[in-house]
Amino acid sequence: MRLTLLHTNDIHGRVDGLARIAALVERIREETPHRVIYVDAGDVEETTTRLSNLTKGVAMHRLLSASGCEAAAVGNAVWLRYGPQAVPAEASAASYPLLLANLEPVEGVRKTALIAQFGREGGRAWELAHGLEVDPIRPVVPEERVVESLDFTDPLISRDALLVAAEQALNRALRAPLLAGRAIRGALLRLETERGAIWERTTTFGEALAERDRLWRVLRVVLDEAKIPGPIATLRLELRGLAPIHGRQLELFPGPRDRKEELEECLRQLGARYGACPVSRIVEVEPWSRIPERRLALIDYDP
């Protein structure tokens, strides 16, 4: 929701200035398509202004009401010039609620008046002003995510090359320290062509995934079905919705380990020791290409 907030303060009886403010508020409201709220921060009264002094500030609040004000705070001018007993008369003359600080509420300044004027937010403001902490204010915590981006000097023109690049991006993203002991609930794939066309897809997993092979199976299906808008110059992968890994039920009688599992375990130990697996693997990308360098690609082997 869009909102424009206008405010004045310390008018101190300047009636001519208040007339210009009224015209300005009216013009802004006519020109603005969304909600415009005008509030005053207090001290509209002044003893040196005859109109204000004779009415102990009441006339100034009537003029402020005519200017389109929707809420006003009680400044220190009313206490210093007329005493706190002047506040109820000003509150009765105003078409808006008078907001007080560190004082008992006066007639006309009620929670229901703020709710009627500003809705639920007005009621919340009244509670906070009176020290009623009903619901604690919680900060907005930014979503944790892991991002891996690849830029290609020679744009990718085949789906096979795109799949190899996406798998490489996933392997690199999974090495991020932020993912230690955590699973992933969703991912975003974004492709940008050399001419700036964008393809983007967000995928939410049925359950939080931590295994590389399961993640890649889901992402590969997404890329297999993608309508690629042209040669890809940039690939961006975001892993989102990070969550703790829950325990899995192990096999009661595990079968014998084959050579592949033993090899993968050795490679995992090397990765833990050196920070990354030192072994790579060769995959076919464009075997039909006349350029030898485009036929095969060397990517990280992540067991």
Image (cartoon, grey):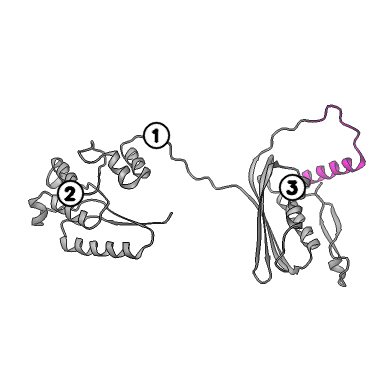
Give the class, few, some or many, for how many residues have Cα within 10 Å of label 1's Cα (few <14, many ≥20): few
Q: Which residue is rendered at x = 16% and y = 48% of the image?
A: 93
* First to last magenta residue range: 250-272
Circle 3 residue: 215
Would residue 126 be found to the left or right of residue 199 on screen? Answer: left
Q: Amino acid at mark 1?
A: Val
The kind of residue tagged 2 is: Ala
Name the residue carrying label 1: 134
Residue at x-position 79% and y-position 30%: 250
Mark 3 → mark 1, Cα distance in angstroms:
43 Å
Locate the N terminus and report the quarter of the image it occupies. Answer: bottom left
Q: Quadrant of residue 261?
A: top right
Label 2 crowding class (10 Å Cα cut-off): few <14, some 14-19, many 20+? some
177 or 46, nearer to the observer: 46
Q: Disc 1 on helix, strand or loop?
A: loop
Residue at point 76%, 30% (across, down): 249
User: For residue 267: magenta?
Assistant: yes
For residue 79, side relative to residue 158 (left or right) = left
Name the image quarter holding residue 102.
top left
- Please indicate, yes or no, whether residue 165 appears anywhere in the rendered image: yes
Residue at 90% over, 43% down: 260
Say left or right for 116 vs 291: left
Q: Which residue is mark 2?
A: 77
